[in-house]
Image: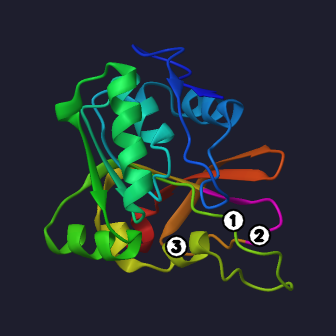
């Protein structure tokens, strides 16, 4: 069972779609992320990629984010996000779900000139692979130049990946903090202005 861990909707239960394709971010990991972000979430405009159950975006809204855009490729999972939004009692007009591939969404948002203060991405874990640079979705995100364009100056990217995944933080990304819990690693990154 998953719950909202802080803010206006603390304790509200979130339902998770059945099946292996959704791997919800555990509550302890969520708490560690938001403890690290502190007041950064308040009044932030948030983009959640690979939204799954919408747990991270809903947590942001509960903790005072101004607006959240959740991107989820699976229409059935997107419908669950809407159900979870209703269950939290949080303002529905501040939370939007788009059924779309995350990488296509990033390109469209960049072309439209949209920017966010906080981007959350905890994509599905890839298989355990041979040593070398990761081929995971998390690594692919760091190699997507449009992702830098949709993050506001001094914004934050929270990127999740498996503990066995050798994700390499590449310029212009700069790592601020690493949180580890079980099989999950969450990296808090920003754009290094000197590398832009």
- How packed is label 1: few (under 14 Cα within 10 Å), some, or many (20 or more)? many
Q: Secondary structure at mark 2?
A: loop
Residue furthest toward the left? Answer: 112
Label 1 sits on a secondary structure element that is: loop
The image quarter in which residue 76 lies: bottom left
Circle 2 residues within 10 Å: few <14, some 14–19, many ≥20: many
Residue marked by disc 1: 125
Q: Which residue is mark 2?
A: 165
Q: Residue at x 23, y 24 (%)?
A: 91
Q: Nearer the viewer, residue 115 or 103?
A: 103
Task: Give the left or right position of residue 2, taking residue 77 as reference.
Answer: right
- Residues under numbered marks 3 and 2 in contact, where contact means CB atoms less than 8 Å apart: no
Query: In front: 2, or 186?
Result: 2
Instruction: Report how far apart the C-alphas of labels 3 and 2 lie in the structure.
Output: 14 Å
Please provide percent x and percent y for residue 127: 77, 75
Tell me, yes or no, whether the highlighted magenta stretch contains residue 165: yes
Q: Which of the two discs, 1 and 3, labels the residue nearer the N terminus?
A: 1
Q: Can residue 196 be found in the magenta stretch? A: no
Q: Is residue 72 left or right of residue 129?
A: left
Position of 165 relative to 153 (above/below):
below
Q: Bounds of the magenta span?
A: 160-166
Which residue is tagged 3? Answer: 142
Regarding mark 3 in the picture, which secondary structure is present there? helix
- Closer to viewer: mark 1 or mark 3: 1
Mark nearest the camera among 3 and 2 is 2
Q: Pick whichever of labels 1 and 2 is earlier in the sequence.
A: 1
Residues 67 and 58: in front is 58
């Amino acid at each position: 069972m998953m719950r909202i861990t802080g803010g206006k909707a603390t304790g509200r239960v979130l339902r998770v779609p059945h099946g292996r394709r959704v791997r919800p971010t555990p509550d302890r990991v969520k708490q560690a992320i938001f403890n690290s972000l502190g007041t950064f979430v308040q009044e932030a405009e948030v983009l959640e990629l690979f939204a799954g159950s919408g747990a991270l975006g809903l947590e942001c809204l509960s903790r005072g984010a101004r607006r959240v855009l959740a991107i989820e490729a699976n229409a059935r999972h997107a419908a669950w996000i809407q159900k979870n939004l209703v269950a939290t009692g949080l303002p529905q007009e501040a939370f939007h779900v788009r059924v779309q591939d995350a990488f296509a969404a990033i390109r469209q948002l960049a072309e439209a000139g949209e920017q966010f203060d906080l981007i959350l991405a905890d994509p599905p874990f890839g298989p355990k692979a041979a040593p070398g640079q990761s081929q995971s979705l998390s690594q692919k995100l760091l190699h997507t130049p449009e992702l830098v364009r949709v993050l506001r100056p001094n914004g934050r990217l929270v990127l999740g990946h498996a503990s066995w995944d050798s994700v390499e933080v590449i310029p212009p990304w700069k790592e601020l903090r690493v949180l580890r819990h079980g099989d999950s690693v969450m990296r808090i990154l920003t754009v290094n202005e000197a590398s832009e």
